[in-house]
Amino acid sequence: MLRPRPEVNSTTGQNRNPVVLVHGWNSHPGVWNRLVPRLEAASLPYWRFDHSAMAGEGLVGRAVALETYVDEMRDRTGYDGPVDLVCHSIGACIARQCLEVADGAARKARVRHVIMLGPPNNGSALAELFSDPDRGPEVVGRLAGVFVPPDFDPLADPIVQHVRPGSRTMRALRAAGVRDNIAYRVIVTANPAAVEAFFPWFGGRTWELDGNGRYRRTLHGDGVVATSESVLPGVPLEVLAPGPDGGGRQIPPGHFCHIQLPRNPIVIGRVVEYLAS
């Protein structure tokens, strides 16, 4: 199994909770490049977990790698207190697999906050749609080069198969539930005004599964993950929609879609606010 290379910033030695940044599927640590300067400005140390080279590993393997990475960073920095996790998309499932399934009973992992951006906590209708023999090829074709690589084969991708709502891995996550000694935050976006530019590949909408297992498109989602898929019991959803930032500057609607969540200035502001609290 490939192991991610440790990365640490210059402020790690300070007496602050390190922030472990966990990127999503088919992504890389560069997605945090707009968050990192804000963390540095707030004197918040950060560790960037890189699982981009682990294409052959599913959620379980990447969760093991995350645990190993945090242990290595503790050894490297001498820090032994609680850490905070900021996770984008599938990164949240990796963290929850580590904290709630693998470590759920032992509770050895010392974690204060888990902040999730667009997490498919209940599985992904899009992953299910990708795997549909009739409808999947058209959907994959629409997102080729945008959200999936041009030669993408969903049936050969362990992450896609693990986040299908009925998979054994997602059933284990749902059964594990959240931990009462961790503060969870879930930040998602939606497109109530039906702006097509929000996520033009699906006309500004997001695929989800209804209660009868049928596909439908909704405005309650970020183009990739439906709001209903991010729900965690007892954890309020913070739903953001396209509009201006706190300074009155208009943010393009496309900056609120799933792919742009780690770079969205409003999302970044909320994350830093929670971490500094």
Image (tube, rainbow, N blue to C red):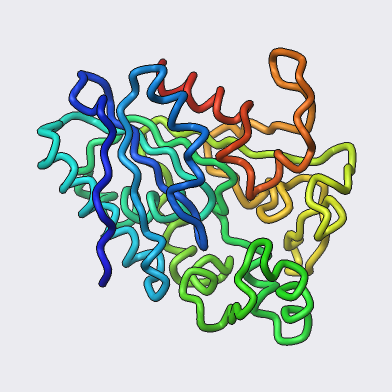
Q: Is residue 10 above or below residue 221?
A: above
| Relative depth, front residue between 135 and 104 | 135
Location of residue 234 in the rendering, given as x and y in whole percent from the top left corner: 52, 35
Looking at the image, which residue sits at the far bottom?
Answer: 133
Quadrant containing the C terminus in the rendered view: top left
- Is 181 placed left or right of 215 in the picture? left
Q: Name the quadrant containing residue 191.
A: top right
Q: Name the quadrant containing residue 3.
A: bottom left
Location of residue 82 in the rendering, given as x and y in whole percent from the top left corner: 24, 31
Looking at the image, which residue sits at the far top?
Answer: 247
Give the residue at x 26% y 21%: 16
Location of residue 15 in the rendering, given as x and y in whole percent from the top left corner: 20, 18
Location of residue 138 in the rendering, given as x and y in whole percent from the top left corner: 79, 78
| Relative depth, front residue between 214 and 117 | 117
From this viewpoint, is residue 181 visible? no
From this viewpoint, is residue 139 visible? yes
- Is 183 placed left or right of 126 in the picture? left
Give the residue at x 61% y 80%: 151
| Relative depth, front residue between 35 and 221 | 35
